[in-house]
Amino acid sequence: MQMPVTQARQSMGNFESAMAVWKALFLREAVVRMFGSRLAWVWLVAEPLVNVLWLILIFTGIRVRHIGGIETALWIAIGMLVFMTFKRTLSQVQNGVSANGALFSYRQVRPADVVLARAMVEGVSMLIISSMLFFVGTLFGWMSWPASVFQVLEAFTLAWLCGLGLGMTFAVLIKLVPEMERVINFIMMPLMMISGVVFPLSMVQPPYLDWLLLNPLAHAIEAGRVGFSPYYHAVTGLDLGYAYSCALVLVFTGLALFRRFNERLVTQ
């Protein structure tokens, strides 16, 4: 009976140690993101705001007031903010190992701890920024409050999980083949186009639509729009189960790669 009790206490001690490390890393990353430079917090808010506004201005200029049965501003804001949650999480996770090499001299800190903390900070910050933008847009009558808050959170969570998993995978690939970073940066703009951020996927006809729907981000973005308005004409083939499967596969792939190449990530 003594052995199981001892093992339970040891496991609890390991868990408490891990929680202390994650909390410290989370607070450190939050401070760096907000106050790492003079205008860090301004850029944190300005980047998604500017990306949303320039698309709204383009669609306003060509006199498109509704897309899929909802206001153009709302349609664009949802797509851009969900995609930016993915993109910024991926970027922070991808660069997390190289940016925090000095921390690995502490035995308690592992590469996976650093990138998970970075991903959490980015996810929370994007959720706060997005809520602020939707709130302000609702006050001015440009947008509306979501019909299903849970489904909108689900969309952001799916994008965040995809960014976390793909970011971890890319972080390992860049360590093994540094030239891969240029390729990864190159594919970000086409990825935004084929995820339904700039144009409605419902305009695409089969069989090309079937290829685009292999992208789990497209499902997350469409789900976010449905969460805001149940009257939105979502693309045929929307499948959150498929999106969750892809997101979990990406996360577990990233974790497996970090475990396999943990020593190389620390030493290189």
Image: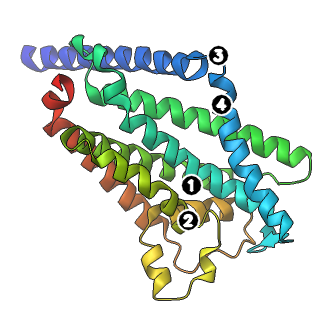
Q: Residue furthest top?
A: 106
Question: Can you give x and y, in whole percent of width and height, for residue 109 in the image?
Answer: 27, 18
The answer to whether mark 2 and mark 1 are in CB contact below 8 A is no
The answer to whether mark 1 and mark 3 are in CB contact below 8 A is no
Q: Residues within 10 Å of mark 4 (few under 14, many from 20)?
A: some
In the rendered image, the vertical position of residue 61 relative to residue 257, given as above or below: below
Q: Earlier in the sequence, mark 4 or mark 3?
A: 3
Q: Nearer the viewer, residue 183 or 167?
A: 183
The dot on residue 193 is 2
Q: Mark 4 and mark 1: span between their CA atoms?
A: 24 Å
Identity, as a three-letter code, of the amino acid under mark 1: Ala
Q: Residues within 10 Å of mark 2 (few under 14, many from 20)?
A: some
- Asked where in the image residue 224 lies, by quadrant, the reply is bottom right
Secondary structure state at the residue bearing disc 2: helix
Question: Can you give x and y, in whole percent of width and height, for residue 85 in the image?
Answer: 55, 45
Q: Does residue 223 appear anywhere in the picture?
A: yes
Q: Residues within 10 Å of mark 1 (few under 14, many from 20)?
A: many
Residue located 42% across and 78% down the image:
211
Identity, as a three-letter code, of the amino acid under mark 3: Arg
The answer to whether mark 2 and mark 4 are in CB contact below 8 A is no
The residue that disc 1 covers is 155
In the rendered image, the vertical position of residue 86 relative to residue 61, given as above or below: above
The answer to whether mark 4 and mark 3 are in CB contact below 8 A is no
Specify the quadrant that holds the C terminus. top left
The residue that disc 3 covers is 38
Q: Residues within 10 Å of mark 3 (few under 14, many from 20)?
A: few
The residue that disc 4 covers is 43
Q: Residue furthest right?
A: 140
Q: Earlier in the sequence, mark 2 or mark 4?
A: 4
Secondary structure state at the residue bearing disc 4: helix
